[in-house]
């Protein structure tokens, strides 16, 4: 089976999965989206209302912000694979339970094996905890580290940054570092290095620290 066929099979398995109780509220499962050749894989938390309706990850407000963040890194959705730690919506968007994370991990692991990305960007603490335990996201966000055969970059969840505006400049700056980090990862993994143009973090004007007006 090609990696693409494997991903299609995983999506099929996920659509009929009954490994945990989340399937009971499932309208559409959200296996994840993107090419099997993606060098970067983003892993969020779980589908929300809109994702459960459409069967695609990050299509609501957090998804719109994620699109802006991807632009900050000079990539589009077509370049990356986007998945979640749980593939069915937790009721009322509550946090996924440990047993749900454990039950769904078989699907996520199969996706990671099929894609074999150079970098996994974790969005939020549930995804971070799968790879890095005992860390505080506020202390290590944006810092790339080697985990097994690849690199992991923990980042704030886009929804957290939407709800807590002071986090926004940090998440924008973290995404702006991604092209350089990808080249660093490629070099370390012996993959082809492509020089990408550097982009400054674009911090919206209204979020820049206020200058003291002396006059
Ligand atoms: N939040 C997530 O973590 N994943 C989605 O797919 C949508 C919102």
Image (cartoon, rainbow, N blue to C red):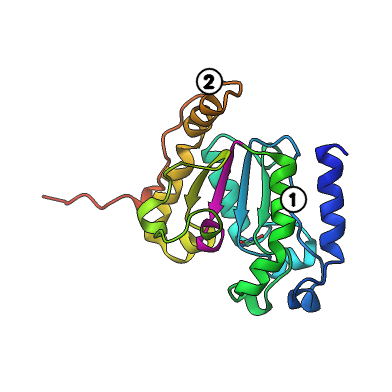
Q: Residue at x 75, y 74 (%)?
A: 20
Query: Farthest left residue?
Result: 214
Left or right: 215, with 76 as reference point: left
Instruction: Pick whichever, 138 or 69, lies toward us.
Output: 138
Location of residue 84 in the rendering, given as x and y in whole percent from the top left corner: 66, 58
Identify the disc placed on residue 67: none
Q: Quadrant of the N terminus?
A: top right
Location of residue 34 in the rendering, given as x and y in whole percent from the top left corner: 74, 44
Left or right: 213, with 197 as reference point: left
Among the 4 quarters of the image, the one containing residue 138:
bottom left
Instruction: Kindly state the secondary structure of the residue where label 2 is placed.
Output: loop
Q: Residue at x 85, y 48 (%)?
A: 8
Mark 2, residue position: 195
Q: Nearer the viewer, mark 1 or mark 2?
A: 1
Alpha carbons under labels 1 and 2: distance apart: 30 Å
Q: Which residues are magenta?
A: 118-128
Quick check: 43 above or below 50? above
Per the image, is 114 magenta?
Answer: no
Instruction: Pick whichever, 199 or 150, lies toward us.
Output: 150
Q: Tell which quarter ligand 1 is in.
A: bottom right
Location of residue 120 in the rendering, given as x and y in whole percent from the top left corner: 58, 45
Mark 1, residue position: 110
Q: Are marks 1 and 2 in contact (CB under 8 Å)?
A: no
């Amino acid at each position: 089976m090609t990696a693409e066929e494997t991903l299609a099979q995983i999506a099929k398995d996920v659509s009929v999965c009954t490994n945990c109780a989340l399937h009971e509220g499932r309208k559409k499962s959200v296996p994840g989206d993107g090419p099997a050749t993606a060098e970067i894989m983003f892993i969020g938390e779980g589908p929300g209302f809109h994702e459960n309706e459409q069967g695609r990850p990050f299509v609501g407000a957090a998804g719109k912000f994620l699109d802006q963040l991807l632009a900050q890194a000079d990539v589009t959705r077509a370049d990356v694979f986007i998945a979640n730690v749980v593939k069915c919506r937790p009721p009322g968007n509550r946090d996924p339970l440990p047993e749900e994370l454990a039950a769904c991990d078989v699907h996520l692991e199969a996706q990671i094996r099929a894609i074999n990305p150079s970098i996994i960007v974790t969005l939020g603490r549930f995804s971070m905890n799968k790879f890095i335990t005992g860390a505080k996201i506020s202390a290590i966000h944006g810092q790339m580290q080697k985990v097994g055969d690849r690199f992991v970059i923990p980042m704030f969840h886009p929804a957290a940054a939407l709800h807590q505006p002071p986090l926004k400049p940090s998440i924008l700056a973290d995404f702006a570092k991604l092209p350089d980090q990808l080249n660093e990862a490629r070099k370390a993994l012996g993959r082809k290095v492509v020089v990408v143009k550097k982009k400054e973090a674009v911090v919206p004007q209204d979020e820049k620290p206020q200058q003291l007006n002396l006059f």
